[in-house]
Amino acid sequence: MKVQLTKLAHARSGDKGDTANIGLIALHDELYPILVREVTAERVKQHFKGICHGEVERFELPNIGALNFLLHESLGGGGTLSLMTDAQGKTFSTALLRMEIEISQQEATDLHG
Amino acid sequence: MKQKIRIAAGQGFWGDLPDAPVRQVEGGPIDYLMLDYLAEVTMSIMQKQKARDPNAGYARDFVPLMRRILPACVERGIKVTANAGGVNVRGCANAVIDVARDLGLAGKVRIGIVTGDDIMLRIDELLSRGVELRNMDTGAPLSTVRDQIQSANAYLGASPLVEALNQGAQIVITGRATDTGLTLAPLIHEFGWSNNDWNRLAAGTIAGHIIECGAQASGGNCQYEWRSIPNLADVGFPIVEASPDGTFVITKHERTGGWIVIPSIKEQLVYEMGDPREYITPDCIADFTTVRLEYEGRDRVRVYGIEGRPATEFLKVSISYSAGFKAVGTLVYAWPDAYDKAQAADRILRRRLDRLGLKFEQVLTEFVGVSATHGPLAGPPHPDIPEVQLRVGVRGQDRSAIERFTKEIAPLILTGPPAVTGFAGGRPKVEEIVAYWPALIPKEEIKPVVEVLET
């Protein structure tokens, strides 16, 4: 079944030049493997179609149950060059939490149990 | 040797809550106050201020702040590390010395200053010797923007600050020092960590990373259970309580708002993160995949297990350069058909700009209330949306073209779609763009200079 990431994770995002970073953090340690399985760099790239014009890189932080994504070419040039309202990519965090992922019936039961 | 050192964050950026450092000093026991003032383009603003007034060019807010807290700092032996010096570290230090004398504290406090980060006057010499200072993001050599450079500073690490503390400085003022070095230096000074004790240096660096954005570690901008965060109006800024073994606790003063919880620390850990295994500073490489967190009581999170690796042979350089001009105009369209009207106004505006033959590098239209933050991910707006803000930005090298654009916004009120308002601020302002150019420089090119001044 489909579930929105906001049910499984919280996040914080920021910028480095024209690259936005999104740290996606599992709400509970048991949910981290689902994030690793479902929230791939490819899925994130697809999710941010029309927003992220470059590559998406993913890094794993199993110690804190988090994934870090780098979305290159996403901030209209970045820093002071950018004309965007969100030139610092601060709201990319919740934009990612809009993503819907697939979880099993068992995982859904655990989530609501 | 002390077994616990408490370092309090007082400012997360230049313009953060003005009273936060005062509350850190007055709200409970601390050993150090750490103040981070410098964002990436702050140096260029300060360079401009110094060009107009040779006594300016530093974070001026720091001086009245010191007037408020210096007596308490002297009385209780609280030391201060601050990168408030900008491009005029000596000017900043002299202003603080004047304050100390005014307060009758002459002879009771020593001011350490760290310079040597400013390479503005050495650019041509460096380029001529083949130090290309290529843009770390784009790979372009610095020579392509040579004539537009406004400031150039190497990020100094903790070492010169340690030297100043070792020489008895109570207030250490730097120019472009790293945010993390302001926290790491006191730990090296107090605990005598050696300069190749990579795990401990990484621990101090990560401690610095956690508190360098102020309240963003203690409940500010915290997504996790945000409605439950207590009393953000009185948010307590974070404090590192560090031990000689490199472990530390993140906490805050009692009877302050906000919270220190594992999720708030995790959110700050991943903030502006690149490769978590390679957080590179002048002092070490910190590995964020080794961080362990556990609760040690209410508003106390213990951080341990951190590992690090040897520092690289390079320092990062922050260069700012003029990159043209920009302006942003906004208008607000009301129900009914607010979004349709805003879109129609945008089409009219663009047709007029085209007819004027103005050349821009970029024109960006956003619809605030519809898609400005999440773009197409937000989906179509509600048909009865009460209002939409049209926000149009332009950027280019020709200042007159940007000026002309600013004159095309207000006329849309009387010459475009109806039910429009929100133009109280007058014409949009034309802004000079000062852009950021990150580069690397071999460490041996930079010689930090430490002086300790008497008051």
Image (spheres, helix red, strand yellow):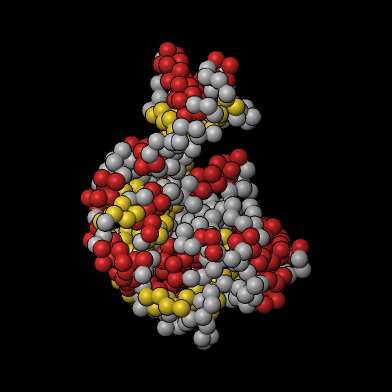
Residue displayed at 54% across by 60% down: B227
Q: Is residue A30 above or below residue B86?
A: below
The x and y percentages for residue B102 are 76, 63
The x and y percentages for residue B356 are 44, 14
Quadrant of the rendering where the C terminus of chain B is positioned: bottom right
The x and y percentages for residue B191 are 47, 81
Image quadrant in which you'd find residue A109: bottom left
Residue displayed at 38% across by 56% down: A6
In the image, B342: left or right of B362? right
B33 or A40: nearer the eye?
A40
B182 or B366: nearer the eye?
B366
Asked if one can make out residue B90 in the rendered structure from this viewpoint, the answer is yes
In the image, B3: left or right of B319? right
Q: Is residue B426 above or below residue B204?
A: above
Image quadrant in which you'd find residue B197: bottom left
Residue displayed at 67% across by 77% down: B76
B90 or A49: nearer the eye?
A49
Q: Is residue B243 above or below residue B406?
A: below
The x and y percentages for residue B444 are 35, 61
Tell which residue pokes out farthest to the top in this image.
B355
Residue displayed at 54% across by 34% down: B386
